[in-house]
Image (cartoon, rainbow, N blue to C red):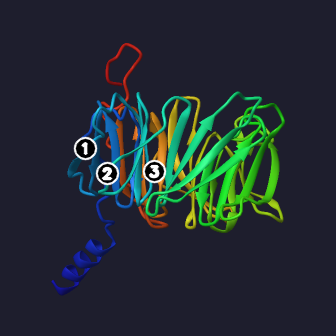
Amino acid sequence: MRTLVLAVVALVLVVPSARADYLRLPTPKPDAGFALQGENVLVGAHNVLTSYAPDGTPRVIPLPKHRGELRFLNASDDAIGLELSVSDYVALNGKPWRKLGGLYVSSRVMGSKALITRDHSYDEGGSFDVLDLRTGARKHFSVAEERPVGPQVVGDYLAYFVHFAVVDRETLVVRRLSTGREVYRRRLGDSGGFDLLPGGRVIVATPGSYNGAWRIREVTRKRMRTIREVALLSGQLEATAQGIAIVRSDAQFRGDVWLLGYDGRMRPLTPRVAGLEDVEFNGHRLAFTVGDCVFTGLVPKPGALLPGVPADGCVRSNDGGAG
């Protein structure tokens, strides 16, 4: 009898624990986007901005008065940026909204700073303002090159593209925020996006050596190296100190999220799911969309079972029905 009991105990010990699922947030389609903010997920849907806690508890964040239609949101751990039909607004967490310009003005928040882009003719260049939301200090950067887009600020570095979408001329420029001095530039030819990291280091996706492939590259003042060439990548990436989250997709419109390490090794973070498209990643937590739905959860540890994605009814067919 004792032998039988021990055998049963041993069997119980080797049975793997039940697989947890990524949390499906109780939100309608995020028609104005979504963003990670620390452990929470911000969702813009039906002209309402909602912050969801890790357990899915919602908290509505009041929008600016006389706001117009909510079109897009972005966020950092410290601040929120909104694109409305009448203007852009930014605010530190819990602080009043601040209106930024009007037509031909767009903005993005990174840390406690707001990046303000003023668009001119493609041939005339453009300009960026970096606004410190804590102190109110503002720095202005003029760019006398065509199509400057996508500014990012981390620490004392400002990065952006010039000659954007110009065949074989797209160029990454990195400057010092404090002095405006150019640190380096790299002519990439074409790209799928980039992320600026501390120290002026940039992670960028460029077209690969064959159709459907992208090279994930690390760019610094001294060199540009390929971390890995990846097939079936949408070009979207989210780079952090812990690694790079990338979204792969196939011909059947199924997608999955992978974590690419700076040593070139990869491991999956989600199963492959029809309709998985956009992802947010902060180094330890994911948020992603599947069709009309938003999911979130902690990144699984290496070797652990992948969390499930309960996506029934999230993807709609061409006739409007749930697929």
Kindly identify which residue carries mark 1. Answer: 62
Q: Position of residue 241 (x, y in %)?
A: 57, 67
Seen at 48% across and 60% down, the residue is: 111
Which numbered circle lies on residue 96? 2
Q: Position of residue 11 (x, y in %)?
A: 28, 72
How far apart are the two marked residues, 3 and 1, measured between alpha carbons? 33 Å
Q: In the image, is residue 237 above or below residue 101?
A: below
Disc 1 residue type (three-letter)? Pro
Answer with mark 3 or mark 2, whichever residue precedes in sequence: 2
Residue 83 located left or right of residue 19? right
Discs 1/2, front: 2
Crowding at dot 2, Cα within 10 Å, few <14 / some 14-19 / many 20+, comes out as few
Residue 105 located left or right of residue 311? right
Q: In the image, is residue 83 above or below residue 219?
A: above
Task: Using the rendered image of the protein, determine whether residue 309 is visible from the camera's viewpoint.
Answer: no
Q: Which is more toward the observer, 218 or 109?
A: 109
Residue 202 located left or right of residue 138? right
Crowding at dot 3, Cα within 10 Å, few <14 / some 14-19 / many 20+, comes out as many
Disc 2 residue type (three-letter)? Pro
All told, the count of numbered labels is 3
Seen at 63% across and 51% down, the residue is: 140
Rendered-image quadrant of the N terminus: bottom left
Asked where in the image residue 40 lies, by quadrant, the reply is bottom left
Q: Secondary structure at mark 1?
A: loop
Discs 3/2, front: 2
